[in-house]
Image (cartoon, grey):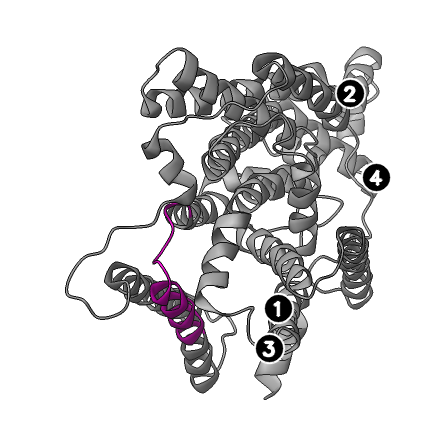
Amino acid sequence: MNALLNTLRGNVRQYGMIIALAAIVILFQITTDGVLLKPLNVSNLVVQNAQILILAIGMVIVIVARHIDLSVGSVAAFVGAASAIMMTQYDFPWWLAVFLGLLIGAAIGAWHGFWVAYVGIPAFIVTLASMLLFRGLTLVVLKGATVGGLPEQFKAIGNGFLPEIGPDTGFHNLTLLIAVAAVGVLIFLEVRRRNAQTAYNFEVLPFPLFAVKLALLTIVIMYFAYLLADARGLPIVGLILAGLIVIYTFIMNKTVFGRHVYAIGGNVDAATMSGVNTKRVDFLVMTNMGLLAGLAGLVTTARLTAANPKAGVNFELDAIAAAFIGGAAVTGGVGTVVGAIIGGLVMGILNNGMSLLGVSIDWQQAIKGLVLLLAVAFDVWNKRRTAGSGGAGAESAEPSAPPPDKLAEEIEAMETTGARSSGELARPLAPSEGVTARSAEAELSVDSVDSDDPPKT
């Protein structure tokens, strides 16, 4: 029991949102007389919220890198409009229009990355300008009208389901098979991680609690798959979303790029002095956000079966709220892809549950605003708690490293005045001088270090 309590206490941020999500599901399941978890409603939940969940994946990475992107809704609308025009007015094949739509989204993200990373304009200003720019361009491209008549293959991206296979069992067999495979992979990864932690003498859950954890995860996944298989099966957009979760979780946890994003968000000066190419990482983070915004725009257009000038309105607010509710820190450096997905599900279930209860749109907005405020307040409280106890995330008592420009001035002054002669060098360094000298050495080595290499110790 103590191990369980210690685990929960040390991961309040992660487990808190899972507990909150479970509480919201139980609340609406009771108050809607079981309608919330009916198979058809669960299937609709996935289809209706897929675009927000896609945006939340990119937004949490942007927030971890201490930026923000206010233009994702407008970019999604513009990409959806441009793709619809290509297919309906210029007879582009649907797959080519999808590819070009993703390319346009990535190009817009690169445009943002250029201004943010290499010109130094805050992302808030750059993306605020783009929010207005691409909302206007969407109206120009569509000429204020809705464009329909899209190919069926394209519309299947937003509304289609995986095909049926195997004998008639009354359920969607392929969905159940995918769920079983997902459970097998999850158990394998959890066991492998536990063995690795045990090999390095890290603290792990006692085996009975570990087995209970795996059993709960298996039950949740299989029950979710059962609900989908009892309706129409796994939506195509759900498969796309699952692939994105796996890919971006791997990128953020297992690659050099992911470690650099967390390093920059935690302390950009320290990351710079460690050899991280912060400008390139910022550029790639914004480019990736544009790519995912383009994908969300394509999914939205496919689900609506038309390009609409009003598509994507408030997408940016929902994506930002999902990231913060899912545990991203307002100061950057903290946040996970899975957490953003949980935050997005909280928002989606709140919308769905309140709609089933007949709550008006204005009250829905007010309640979601309060939920966002509470989530951020929880983040602030948790940071102060860990700072006070010296736990993970505690504020450092050491002063932050001086900025590179100041270091350069100090180095130049030392070289010019010759303050440290050979005789002086024999004198032991005072603590403050030692810090400055070590910082100067680190600064001098920044340009010679390949940013793709892991930090050297």
Range shown magenta: 217-237
- Assess whether mark 2 and mark 3 are in contact (beta carbons under 8 angstroms): no
- From the image, tell me which residue sits under label 3: 33
Q: Residues within 10 Å of mark 4 (few under 14, many from 20)?
A: few
Q: Which numbered dot is residue 15?
A: 1
Label 3: which secondary element:
loop
- From the image, tell me which residue sits under label 2: 405
Where does the C terminus fall, quadrant-wise?
top right
Point out the tag, 1 or 2, that comes first from the N-terminus: 1
Q: Position of residue 309 (x, y in %)?
A: 62, 25
Instruction: Determine the main secondary structure of the stretch shown in magenta.
Output: helix
- Check the image and report above or below for 234 versus 158: below
Q: Residues within 10 Å of mark 3 (few under 14, many from 20)?
A: few
Q: Is residue 15 visible?
A: yes
- Assess whether mark 3 and mark 4 are in contact (beta carbons under 8 angstroms): no
- Residue 398 vs residue 421, the one in the foreground: 398
- Estimate the spatial distance between the alpha carbons at disc 3 and disc 1, rounded to whole Å: 27 Å
Q: Residue at x 36, y 55 (%)?
A: 234
- Check the image and report above or below for 413 versus 14: above
Label 4: which secondary element:
helix
- Check the image and report above or below for 144 versus 304: above
Q: Label 4 sits on what residue type?
A: Ser
- From the image, tell me which residue sits under label 4: 432
- Estimate the spatial distance between the alpha carbons at disc 4 and disc 2, rounded to whole Å: 18 Å
Label 1: which secondary element:
helix
Q: Going by the image, does 393 lie left or right of 33?
A: right
Disc 4 versus disc 2: nearer the observer: 2
Label 2: which secondary element:
helix
User: Across the whole image, how many numbered discs are drawn on residues?
Assistant: 4
Q: Position of residue 312 (x, y in %)?
A: 62, 34
- Estimate the spatial distance between the alpha carbons at disc 1 and disc 2, rounded to whole Å: 41 Å
